[in-house]
Image (cartoon, rainbow, N blue to C red):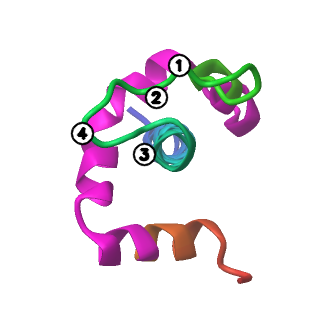
């Protein structure tokens, strides 16, 4: 197999994974801020803030987002890790 093709394929899938992680992380942070309440079931997000809306906004799919839940939980578990991820997503800030 051509090494250039393999590199291009890897970069493509890495980019797709990054988009899915960013979309799911944004969705989770939005839900935590607006719809989650301790000790009670979460409220349903309104139209424009549902998982499919975040998928469209970030150029990915809900299926890809759902496959990245472990990575997002890992990021959310540590405030420093979350901060580093957000800085990586918005380097100009």
> Which residue lies at the image location 51% right of the left edge and 39% below the top edge?
31
Determine the CA span between mark 4 and mark 1.
15 Å
User: For the residue labelled by badge 4, is the local secondary structure a helix, a strand or a loop?
Assistant: helix
Main SS, magenta region, reads helix
Q: Earlier in the sequence, mark 2 or mark 3?
A: 3
Determine the CA span between mark 2 and mark 3.
28 Å
Q: Which residue is mark 1?
A: 62
User: For the residue labelled by badge 1, is the local secondary structure a helix, a strand or a loop?
Assistant: helix
Q: Position of residue 34 (x, y in %)?
A: 57, 43
Q: What mark, if any, has residue 65 been given in the picture?
A: 2
> Which residue lies at the image location 45% right of the left edge and 45% below the top edge?
32
Q: Give the answer, above or below, for where 13 lies relative to 85.
A: above
Q: Marks 1 and 2: CB-CB under 8 Å?
A: yes
Q: Earlier in the sequence, mark 4 or mark 2?
A: 2
Look at the image and tell me in which quarter the C terminus lies: bottom right
Please provide the residue range marked out in magenta.
Answer: 54-83
Q: Which residue is mark 3?
A: 3
Q: Residues within 10 Å of mark 3 (few under 14, many from 20)?
A: few
Q: Is residue 52 left or right of residue 32?
A: right
Q: Position of residue 19 (x, y in %)?
A: 57, 42
53 vs 6, nearest the viewer: 53
Q: Which residue is mark 4?
A: 70
> Which residue lies at the image location 35% right of the left edge and 35% below the top edge?
68
Determine the CA span between mark 4 and mark 3.
30 Å
Q: Earlier in the sequence, mark 1 or mark 3?
A: 3
């Amino acid at each position: 197999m051509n090494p250039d093709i393999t590199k291009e394929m890897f970069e493509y899938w890495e980019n797709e994974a990054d988009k899915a992680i960013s979309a799911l992380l944004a969705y989770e942070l939005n839900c935590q801020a607006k719809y989650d309440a301790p000790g009670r079931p979460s409220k349903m997000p309104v139209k424009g803030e549902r998982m499919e809306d975040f998928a469209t906004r970030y150029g990915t799919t809900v299926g890809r987002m759902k496959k990245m839940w472990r990575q997002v939980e890992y990021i959310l578990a540590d405030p420093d890790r979350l901060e580093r991820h957000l800085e990586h997503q918005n380097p100009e800030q």
